[in-house]
Image: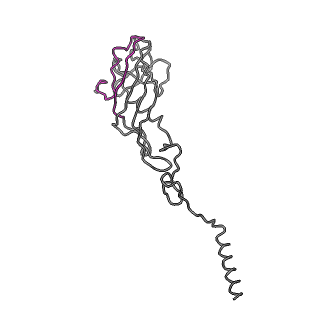
Amino acid sequence: MARPEDSAWAVSVAQVASRPGQSKPIDAVFPAPSGIGDDVIGVKEGADVTVRGSFDSIVDGLILTAHIDAPVTAECTRCLKPIERDWGVDVTAFFPYADDDQHGRGGRGRDDDHEVEIIAGEEESEDVYPLSRDCAFADLEALLRDTLVEELPLQPLCSEDCLGLCPQCGVNLNEHPDHRHVVTDLRFASLAGLKAQLEAEEQSKGE
């Protein structure tokens, strides 16, 4: 059975757990979990994700307040240019204690193979995550995945004023802003042909 401390996303919180008013700073780099985004925009699995903030102990559990920085790879939805930039997200999450005998818990949750307890009557949501059964470790894998997936922009742009691609030939208009096409309205093409024919007939009669 896997141990909580063996996780690449585990943070030791034993020194502040069950001691209200205590705080533990965190400034660490974790590998990006799998499943963050897709081919259009996402964070590559294993990329360095930085978490800076603190765990603050309250009566019912730990509150994590942090800023997450992750390297995002994307494709501009207007010009298809590859994008690589750091993406910063602020997060606040709750890690309830698992000891229901001491803290009056009810309800069941699960962290991999480790069953945990959650606060009675409190709905499980994306910002509530379990501690290990002994409350000694907080695992950030699910939090990182949920937070980054939720905050990724739906239509990434290389710049807010990106001009995109020419709809006729696909040339990048950011690189060729003066690019133009002379477009003939097809509704008048037959009339132009008839006009040329009549002019040619008039000219032949005059000769």
Quarter-wise, where is residue 30 in the image? top left
Closer to us: 14 or 108: 14
Closer to us: 20 or 168: 168
Quarter-wise, where is residue 104 in the image? top left
> What x and y, as percent, mark residue 58?
44, 13
> What x and y, as percent, mark residue 69?
41, 32
Confirm whether the magenta stretch covers residue 13.
yes
Quarter of the image for the C terminus: give it: bottom right
Up-down relation of residue 62 to residue 141 (above or below)? above
Q: Is residue 2 left or right of residue 131?
A: left
Q: Is residue 47 left or right of residue 64?
A: left
Up-down relation of residue 117 to residue 31 (above or below)? above
Up-down relation of residue 37 to residue 13 (above or below)? below
Q: Is residue 181 left or right of residue 126?
A: right
Taking the spot 68% from the left edge, 86% from the top edge, the residue there is: 204
What colouring does the structure picture have? Answer: one colour
> What x and y, as percent, mark residue 116?
38, 21
Confirm whether the magenta stretch covers residue 23.
yes
Count of marks overlaid on the render: 0
Query: What span is colored magenta in the figure?
Result: 3-32
Taking the spot 50% from the left edge, 49% from the top edge, the residue there is: 78
Single out the residue that lies furthest toward the bottom: 207
Taking the spot 37% from the left edge, 37% from the top edge, the residue there is: 34
Q: Is residue 203 left or right of residue 145?
A: right
Taking the spot 34% from the left edge, 21% from the top edge, the residue there is: 137
Closer to us: 39 or 132: 39
> What x and y, as percent, mark residue 190?
65, 72
Quarter of the image for the N terminus: give it: top left
